[in-house]
Image: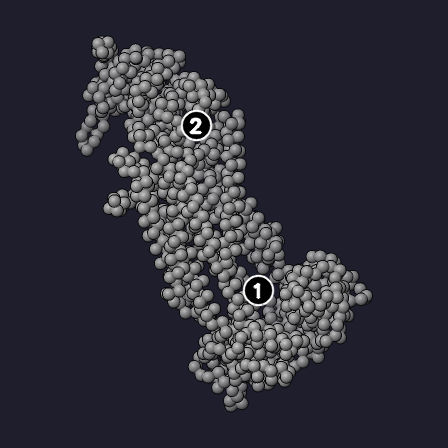
Amino acid sequence: MVNFVLRDLRGSGRSLWMLFACLLLGVTLIAASGGLLQQVRSGLLTDTRALFGGDIEISQRSPLNDQELVWLRANGRVSLLIELRTMLMTADGQSQVVELQSFDDNYPLYGEVTLDPPLPLDQVLAKRDGLWGAVIDPVLAERLNLSVGELVTVGGLTLALRALVIRQPDRSLSADWRGPPVLLADQALSDTGLLQPGSLLDYEYRVRIDQNLDRWRANLTTAFPDADWEVRTFKERSRRLGEVLDQVGSALLLIGFSALFIGGLGVSNSVHTYLQSKLATLATLRALGMREVRVARLYLGQVLLLAGLASIAGAVLGGGLALAGVALAAERLPLAPTLLALIGPLLIAMLFGLLTALTFALPALGRAMAVTPAALFRGIDANPVRTPTRYRWLTLASGLLTAGLMVLALPQPLFGIGFLGVTLTLLILLEGVVQLLRLGALHLTQRQMLVEHFYWRLALANLYRPGAPLRPTLLSLGSALTLLVASTLVVAALLRTINDTIPEQAPSLIFYDVLQSQVDNFRKQVLATSSLDRLDLAPLVLGRLNQVNGDSLRDSTDLERVLEARDEHKLSYRLDNFDNVQVKRGSWWHDDYQGPPLVAMEDREADQLGLKVGDRLTFTILGETIEADLVAIYGQKRFQSRFWLEGIFSDGVLEPFISRYVGAIYTDPAAAVKLQDTLAVEFPNVVTVRTESVLREARTLLTRASSGLALVAAISLLASLLVLSSVVAGSRARQVYDATVLHSLGARLNTIHRALGLEQVLLALLTSLFALVLGGLIAWGLLEYRLELEIDGVWWTALIVAPLVSGLCLGLGTHHLLRRLNPSPAVLLQS
Amino acid sequence: MIVLNNLTMHYTLNNNRIEVLRAIELTVPGGQSVAVVGPSGSGKTTLLLLLAGLERPSSGTVALDGIALESLDRDQLADLRRDRVGIIFQSFHLIPSLDALDNVALPLEIAADKNARQQAARLLERVGLGDRQHHYPSQLSGGEQQRVAIARALIHRPQLLLADEPTGNLDEHTGADIQDLLFELNQESDTTLILVTHDVELAGRCDRILRLHDGVLNEETDSLRQTLAHG
């Protein structure tokens, strides 16, 4: 029988190849996402100590005291990393924000720093010929067109670039965004003159220990119960990184599962079409004495054989994509592609390919097997309307097995359960919509006003009749279009915000860390700029929130509150709302308010701590206690807020604690470039950032995000196009037959063509409407609650995209059908 | 009235000319029932195709109530079938996605008749399928499907009813029932019936019996009746 299966399959025509294509896409995506996740996980999480820089890290804004240092050194090997964000200037006058990093001799505690040229780090950073050495990141070298041997200036110190970093084991994953690292010796950092009172330095003490991490940490806390430092362990970092990777991996895998699910509809259609063409063979085999179960096995074997081939091809393709992805990411991350790590994810992807084929093929097989050979030989239509019960149970079992395995296969099972919940809800919703549309279409066809428009009635009737393509079309094209609409709206809203809103309101330069002693000169320097429109200068004070309504956060049973108590908050004044925050709860005080201290808190902080307007808050700033009433909770306006202030006090409260300022300068772009370089020379400790470059970064990120969204939408669109092709192919025989009978009964050809065209227009409209409503809701939710952007004004993009894409997809199908639709009623008599 | 004048039909297959119908002359008055019998391949189905305007003759004319079919274009022929012709197929050819009521109502729907469904429901009652109106073809037996097909062919009261082996796919008992129904309804509607069949008994129920052999049509009413009478 194997020979028969293969011979029969060879002559099966193209209907089953659609099954191959539908499965191939989903399996490829699952294999690629699973493979990539596995490679990144094994690359990043196998040596998190190196990635973290030690077993444990203690960080604070000032150096530890001698007693603390003695304790640390007695209990492990300690390495101090000092970090400072500042400006780096090139010999030709360019300036750029960088992250200065100075090390002691113990760095790195884990892993190795690899340089180009390959020299030891301490040798490269040492003072030679009167110049300290510096090592820069390749990202910075590329941005400023710097090469080894050139001189750069940081603060008041000129440094010689002696090497590029090829690999830094603890390079921050956000280094490209925050500022590329510049490595220098700790004495060199002192010589820059940037270590002044009030400078924002991070002292990170990494410790390598040989004992139990939790016990060590407990001993530390016992030894210094009142310390304000922040303590993190590599395990926490590893856990957080693992969680992020799992979330990203789960999201990627779900895209693959969605494509496979949509592709499953294509499997169902192509198996149905294939078996319809095989009904005579099925009947003959059964008439010749083959048992029903054997015939069923024979054809299921064919389907699974092809599904197996598609799954293998998908796994190979996906594996290749994963390896290519890892090779690309390896330029920045400590990753090395390994074939061994791919085996598991690829096998899982193949298993899902087979299970999907089985689940979606069983109902069509059941219906084909329910046709009696006698009916076929008599030429009677005996296709059952419903799938036989046995096959329904088998389908359900196979579907449950697939769903269960999917949940288990996802790194974050909750994502899987959520996905199943959303899919189930969508299916129920869709079924409701389909039933409503059917009822509506049925109702309309019975209206007298359509009596004289037979093609209208025919088109409407084709929406509700059994086997009508409404459900698969809505499910495949509708879901892909929903994603497309949501992506379009989100991208359009983001683009609008960046392109329209920001340039009108954004300053040209924003600056940090102007010391109290520099304020007057800084102001003078800026005001001397001829084209200056505005200068905002506001104090920035760091403080901790200790108590809420008299309850100490440190003593709270809520871990969130305990952790918050250790965090330093950025505090300032309102000053004409210079950072464009927006009050969400409560209200601002009057401009001329002179009473007891009042404070407004940022919503994310407030929500984490469970704060409400009216609470009495106690802060500690430079050792002093400040009490204030919380009168407002405000939100940041994403792209319009720049300083991410966590608390805003009424005027005068922060006066005794002000040591530095932040602010913004509004001028024309050319003047901004000049001013930035001037300020970098005059005030080397002041970090200035051109909004234009931030926007450029934001646009780059946005372009990547848009490309990602477009890719997801394109993939689901491709999957839905495959399904639609199978729907068109599956419906073609029915439509040609119907057209032939109708023509024999006296319906004109153009009436039949009009009815078919109208049916597709109605389908396109309904699909677009479905996608607009659902996609619009998704985009609105994302924009309103996650990105906090307004959706108004971009609806038109979705209104264009949805009908255009659905019209195009269905139009192509209709064109294809009408070209082949030439009903010849003579065949009805001749058959 | 149907008038066939010098009706000839031939095909060319592999450079061979195949004569299907040879210079057929026939006149059928309105209301008459005519059976066309003959062996397979004798041209019976071709004759029906020409009568329905589904194929064009090689030469000669077909006139239905004075309308020459060769003068009509494809749409006009469709209109002619819509208004004046009903066809019953051997394999029924119901539309699987329509229930019995909608299948029967189709010809009136095409003609934009406002009471299509009501009339279809009445006719379904008449053919004994009043309780199966909303069943789909796959939910009906062969006999029931042919009843629906007959109802569909007669719903618009055609002047000409063409039937191609109407009982060919049915068992003997069901076939007999369908025959009864067909002739009852034909008499009620006073329709001209042209029936193609191998079944001599069915042919014997028609007013006239014609034999088609090698593309030539001969009147054999009397001789066949005698054969039937002698068992």
Q: Quarter-wise, where is residue A728 in the image?
A: top left
Residue B180 visible in image: yes
Label 1: element kind: helix
A346 sits left or right of A540 in the view:
left
Please give the label number shown on residue B135.
2
Image coordinates of residue B15 in percent, x first then y, are: 18, 32
Image coordinates of residue A546 in percent, x first then y, are: 71, 69
Q: Quarter-wise, where is residue A782 in the image?
A: bottom right
Identify which residue is drawn at 50% across, 22% down.
B114
Chain containing the residue with disc 2: B
Which residue is farthest left? B16
Colouring mode (rainbow / by chain / secondary structure / one colour) = one colour
A124 to A707, vertically: above or below: below
Name the foreground residue: A664 vs A235: A235
Identify which residue is drawn at 57% across, 64% down.
A695
Disc 2 and disc 1: Cα gap in Å? 65 Å
The amino acid pointed to by label 2 is: His
Which residue is farthest bottom? A129
B180 to A178, vertically: above or below: above
Label 1: how many residues lie within 10 Å, few (<14), some (14-19) or many (20+)? Answer: some
The residue where tag 1 is placed is A695
Chain containing the residue with disc 1: A
Label 2: element kind: loop
Residue A200 visible in image: no
A535 sits left or right of A115 in the view:
right
The amino acid pointed to by label 1 is: Leu
Identify which residue is drawn at 23% across, 24% down.
B40
